[in-house]
Image: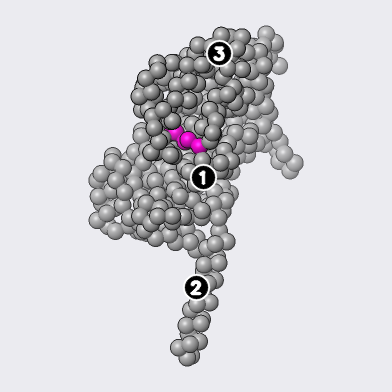
């Protein structure tokens, strides 16, 4: 073969590889019907430093490979709060950390969640899918087996990161203000006063990071002050410029149905959400995050945390919002029990069984997980119990609160 023909053949092959890579998109990566494989290639000395310094947020270069897509020179770092592990590292992949503007399937970042706080492995993925099915915007997730330098590191959840690039899918725009809520103390939307520096540790800016303290926190301070101080008769009209109360109540109701104990109405106050303020307005929206503590018990109280949380307590005093909350709980129960054509099990049980079947073998072979295989099996059984018993429990609790008999 002549040199010219050889070069032409190589060019054709490269163009076919590029076309194949371009044909893939984030939707393919978050296809939860598939157990994906993610390969990370990291200099051995850098990986050792990352393991040794897993409590820090220091970045190290790596190449990421998925299917026929390879992204070179991404930044990886340890991530998580209670989930940080030196044995099975949780990782944030910052695609553009070393190469400005670089993207992976159109994404700026990807979370490789190590699943060290959930023996079943499927709390978060199931909760997020339930939220999305109920019309609440939530991150997409799928599962992958992760290999580092061809060594198996176990089953991970691939989680859609909330950032400036992904915001249009979550809220329809990206030019407003995004904050990550950071738990600092037991906080329930109490008014902290007019000093804006008191709100800054709780709401960490993720976009427009060079703007003033007033630009970031003035509307948050005004929102919190209003929802605390406004008269009951004016509550809806006064708070609505700051928050879509109907959406907030539905969000909380769905979260309560899946028995989330560390979210908006968490056991230690607010936790695990992003807050977005739309550009040119004072209107905010909550985006859910981190659902490892969902499905804690099928008998989780449907009014848990309401009295402590200022916003939810006051919302439940508005008849229309109170009715919406209970109606959304019933709607959630109906979704969980929904039997579609060609099926004999409810939606939630089918989803639990499907995810369990997808990951079971790889999870049992995951020697880095901080659980025994017996604990994994017991947690998997508990998920099936939740799927079977949560809906009747919730229906009876709603009927009891409404002064009706439980059927």
Q: Which residues are magenta?
A: 176-180
The image's mark for residue 309 is: none
Residue at the (45%, 50%) spot, across then down: 108
- Colour convention: one colour
Horizontally, residue 300 falls left or right of residue 372, namely right
Magenta stretch: helix, strand or loop mostly = strand
Residue at the (44%, 25%) spot, across then down: 218
Disc 1 target residue? 166
Disc 3 target residue? 314
Label 3 element class: helix
Disc 2 target residue? 14
Compare residues 378 and 219 and report the one nearer the observer: 219
Q: Classify mark 1: residues with Cα within 10 Å, few (<14), some (14-19) or many (20+).
A: some
Above or below — where is 351 with respect to 249?
Answer: below
Q: Nearer the viewer, mark 3 or mark 2?
A: 3
Where is residue 398 drawn, in percent x and y?
64, 16
Where is residue 159 drawn, in percent x and y?
48, 44
Rounded to the nearest angstrom, the CA distance separating label 3 from label 2 is 61 Å
Query: Is residue 178 part of the magenta span, yes or no?
Result: yes
Query: Is residue 89 part of the magenta span, yes or no?
Result: no
* First in sequence: mark 3 vs mark 2: 2
Q: Classify mark 3: residues with Cα within 10 Å, few (<14), some (14-19) or many (20+).
A: some
Where is residue 287 drawn, in percent x and y?
52, 33
Horizontally, residue 43 falls left or right of residue 249, namely left
């Amino acid at each position: 073969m002549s040199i010219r023909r050889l070069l032409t053949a190589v060019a054709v092959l490269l163009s076919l590889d590029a076309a194949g890579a371009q044909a893939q998109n984030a939707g393919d990566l978050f296809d939860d019907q598939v157990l994906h494989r993610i390969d990370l290639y990291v200099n051995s000395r850098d990986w050792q430093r990352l393991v040794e310094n897993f409590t820090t947020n220091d970045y190290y270069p790596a190449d990421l490979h998925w299917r026929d897509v390879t992204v070179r020179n991404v930044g990886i770092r340890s991530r998580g709060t209670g989930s940080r592990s030196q044995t099975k590292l949780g990782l944030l992949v910052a695609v553009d950390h070393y190469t400005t503007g670089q993207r992976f399937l159109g994404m700026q970042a990807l979370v490789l969640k190590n699943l060290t706080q959930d023996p079943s492995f499927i709390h978060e993925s199931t909760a997020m899918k339930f939220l999305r099915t109920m019309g609440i915007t939530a991150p997409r997730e799928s599962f992958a087996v992760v290999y580092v330098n061809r060594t198996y590191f176990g089953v991970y959840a691939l989680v859609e990161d909330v950032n400036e690039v992904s915001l249009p899918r979550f809220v329809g725009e990206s030019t407003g203000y995004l904050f990550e809520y950071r738990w600092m103390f037991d906080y329930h939307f109490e008014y902290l006063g007019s000093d804006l520096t008191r709100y800054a540790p709780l709401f960490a800016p993720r976009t427009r990071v060079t703007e003033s303290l007033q630009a970031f926190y003035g509307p948050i301070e005004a929102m919190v002050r209003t929802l605390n101080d406004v008269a009951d008769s004016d509550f809806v009209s006064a708070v609505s410029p700051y928050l879509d109360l109907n959406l907030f109540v539905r969000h909380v109701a769905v979260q309560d149905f899946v028995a989330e104990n560390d979210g908006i109405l968490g056991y230690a106050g607010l936790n695990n959400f992003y807050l977005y303020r739309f550009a040119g307005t004072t209107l905010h929206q909550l985006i859910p995050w981190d659902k490892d503590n969902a499905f804690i018990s099928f008998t989780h109280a449907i009014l848990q945390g309401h009295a402590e949380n200022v916003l939810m307590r006051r919302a439940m005093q508005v008849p229309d919002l109170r009715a919406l909350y209970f109606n959304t709980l019933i709607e959630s129960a109906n979704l969980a029990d929904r039997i579609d054509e060609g099926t004999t099990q409810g939606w939630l049980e089918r989803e639990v069984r499907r995810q369990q079947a997808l990951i079971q073998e790889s999870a049992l072979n995951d020697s880095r997980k901080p659980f025994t295989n017996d604990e994994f099996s017991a947690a998997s059984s508990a998920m099936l119990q939740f799927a079977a018993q949560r809906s009747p429990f919730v229906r009876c609790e709603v009927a009891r609160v409404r002064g009706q008999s439980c059927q």
